Amino acid sequence: MKIVGAPRTRALILRIAAHLSLAAIALLVPDVGPNRFWLAALLTGVTPPIAIVVNLLTPDLARNWVEALFDLLLIVTVVHLVPHLWVPAMCLGLMVALAPSVSLHPRSHWIYMGFGLILLTGMTLVALVHGVADWGLATAAVAVTYPAMLYYTYSQMKRMNELRGRDQLMRGMTDLAGSVAHDFNNMLMGIGGHAELARRSLAPDHPAQVDISEVLKGTERAGQLSGQLLNFAGRGVDQSAEINLLDELRLILGLLQTVLPPHIEVKVEAPAAPLYIEVNASQLHQVLVNILLNASEAMSDTEGIIEVALQRVETGAHDAPQVEVVVRDRGHGIPAGEKLRVFEPFYTTKDWGHGLEIGR
């Protein structure tokens, strides 16, 4: 069955349907007792209008606990008409008193405590007035276990609110990253366009041609950064292309020259033949930058060389060859035996004790 409408409307429909179903049971089952007609009338003509008023007039945040309070008061009231169903009513009241929707309220722990007090007081009053047998043990069991259940619910509420806050923060960051990336792209288009016009207006041997070429290369690299921001914001297009890994590595090293400490040298070993791979260039740059920066941080107090080795790996007669990137540093690194997953689905890293291996 599919319930249409807004969440508030669907909740109201389900609530009224439950009341009417209980009213039908009271009418059709004689064992409910001599007050079953009064019970059916209450559940048919009184509680549905109150539920509608509560649903329509209560703000969203308060509705999470006001409707639960309405259900709890309904239970401790209705059980006066059917006191022989005291035990099922107590179980149902305990479920309502710990309703998960209440945890959405910032003061939920106080609301839960109030609900427990209402449940125990109301059910005890019913038991004393109607002489319910063996009510003391059930009430004591609920009173003893309720604090533990309340603590568990409160802990889950705190954890859920923390996750919700992180989710909202990440959404805000992704929205900001997407907006910045779009504005950044617009500025880069203007810079690159004017630089290209200036390059074409000058003679090929003009001294400014070199500087303009560097400006165009810088806009291209900045465009890749914008692509990373768009990927982070979930708005990027996954465009994989066949690229030469050595050329991309040299591009990254050129960008990192001003970032890496002066006492650290990067040495690259690669075969003479080009190593072409099919990958998203922006994501590849992100991985390489992270690995090289991690290696430099591991050598923050050590002078030495970061070795980067590129090599082709044959995987089998029927499998395409793969390209392996090995980064070794002279720092302490992460503890031996631990594995660090840097990026999926393209690359993972494996600890060598004092270096990292990236396998595609």
Image (spheres, rainbow, N blue to C red):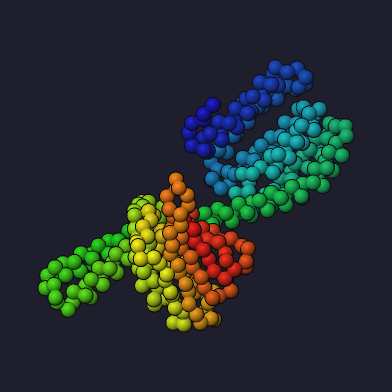
Q: Position of residue 8 (x, y in %)?
A: 52, 38
Q: Is residue 248 above or below residue 236?
A: below
If the image is split into quadrants, where does the N terminus sit?
top right
Furthest residue in direction front, as rendered: 317
Residue at point 77%, 39% (across, down): 122
Looking at the image, residue 292 sits to the left or right of residue 107; the answer is: left
Q: Position of residue 336 (x, y in %)?
A: 62, 66
Q: Is residue 78 visible?
A: yes
Q: Quadrant of residue 26?
A: top right
- Total residue callouts: 0
Residue at point 81%, 27% (across, down): 84
Q: Nearer the viewer, residue 260 or 81?
A: 260
Looking at the image, residue 359 sits to the left or right of residue 203; the answer is: right
Q: Nearer the viewer, residue 156 or 254?
A: 254
Q: Position of residue 288 (x, y in %)?
A: 44, 65
Q: Position of residue 137 (x, y in %)?
A: 87, 39
Q: Is residue 64 above or below residue 251?
A: above
Q: Nearer the viewer, residue 96 or 169?
A: 169
Residue at point 48%, 77% (across, down): 305
Q: Is residue 202 above or below residue 112?
A: below
Residue at point 53%, 61% (across, down): 349
Q: Is residue 44 visible?
A: no
Q: Nearer the viewer, residue 198 or 287?
A: 287
Looking at the image, residue 171 sits to the left or right of residue 113; the answer is: left
Looking at the image, residue 138 sits to the left or right of residue 68; the answer is: right
